[in-house]
Image (cartoon, coloured by chain):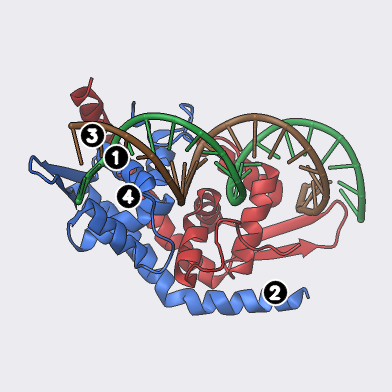
Chain colours: A blue, B red, C green, D brown
Amino acid sequence: MAVSSSGADAERMCPHRLVLEHVTSRWGVLVLIALAERSYRFSELRRAIGSTGGRTVSEKMLTQTLQILERDGMVHRDAKPVIPPRVDYSLTDLGREAAEQVRALALWTDRRVDDVLKAREKYDEARS
Amino acid sequence: MAVSSSGADAERMCPHRLVLEHVTSRWGVLVLIALAERSYRFSELRRAIGSTGGRTVSEKMLTQTLQILERDGMVHRDAKPVIPPRVDYSLTDLGREAAEQVRALALWTDRRVDDVLKAREKYDEARS
DNA sequence: CAGTATCCGTGTTGATACTG
DNA sequence: CAGTATCAACACGGATACTG
């Protein structure tokens, strides 16, 4: 069924943007950050991302995100032929590099949230 | 009409993720990168982003993105009371910091696109 | 457990037309 | 020029049910 990445990326888009969008995608960001810390199993990863504070990923979206990132050579999928099934996800070298960039961004965000919140108050106040 | 940022961010999401999503949003990324270089007027910015290789931003989306980033204290809007109207957009200090992070990510992407493309080929080939 | 398949609501997006 | 307003299409994302 062709993991084409995401419907949004029409063929006419330059590869550079494509990769950027995968990495900065809603769940891509969180997957990369989570896997940067350690490898996870599927459901484990779902819970890990859910506990970050936001809404939890649906299985569908997590699957899709993982497939896209695997196809892009960032995520390594290790499916063990056991029952019950066990699949471990980890980062490749490429993925680790990507994760570093994304993590830097996330850390910066963390440091600056307060300033953003303050800015928003001022903005909203100024036009009410 | 309340620039609430983007419908997706339900109230129940932690601020940290909110900011992250604004900064990593499809057009947010490109706006920050463009403005990191120099300030732009509205239409000028539209063209600048369009010439990056992908599809061009609609006026609506550019407006929305700029408003969100302005509200978050990253973009400065300077509307001159002349005819015809002239509005210049530039980054605040906060915005410049954000842009640096995002730019680092974009530059990394640029350096690694080839590896990603190669990975995709292997992936696709492996299941055909 | 780790997915896949399907349906379906709704948010995001983009054309288009209009205003100051 | 720099937007705003409105509308329609469609992609995204989630809930659910099912499989190996």
Q: Which of the two discs, 4 and 2, sits closer to the camera?
A: 2
User: Mark 4, chain letter?
Assistant: B
Furthest-top residue in this view: B128
Residue A95 at what x, y percent from top left? 24, 49
Q: Are marks 4 and 2 on the same chain?
A: no
Q: Secondary structure at mark 4?
A: helix
Marks 2,1: beta carbons within 8 A? no
Of callouts 3 and 4, the N-terminal one: 4
Q: Which of the two discs, 2 and 1, sits closer to the camera?
A: 1
The local crowd at label 3, few if under 14, some if 14 to 19, many if 20 or more residues have their Cα within 10 Å, is: some
- Looking at the picture, tell me which residue is in the foreground, B89 or A88: A88
**Residue B108: which numbered mark, if any?**
4
Q: Is residue B39 left or right of residue A111?
A: right
Q: Which residue is mark 1?
A: A67
Q: Which residue is mark 2?
A: A124
Q: Which of the two discs, 3 and 4, sits closer to the camera?
A: 3
> What distance separates the C-alpha of mark 2 from that of mark 1?
40 Å
Q: Secondary structure at mark 1?
A: helix
Q: Amino acid at mark 1?
A: Gln
Residue A14 at what x, y percent from top left? 44, 33
> What distance separates the C-alpha of mark 2 from that of mark 3?
46 Å
The local crowd at label 4, few if under 14, some if 14 to 19, many if 20 or more residues have their Cα within 10 Å, is: some
> What distance separates the C-alpha of mark 1 from that of mark 3?
12 Å
- Looking at the picture, tell me which residue is in the foreground, B13 or A90: B13
Q: Are marks 2 and 3 on the same chain?
A: no
Q: Which residue is mark 3?
A: B119
> What distance separates the C-alpha of mark 3 from that of mark 4?
16 Å
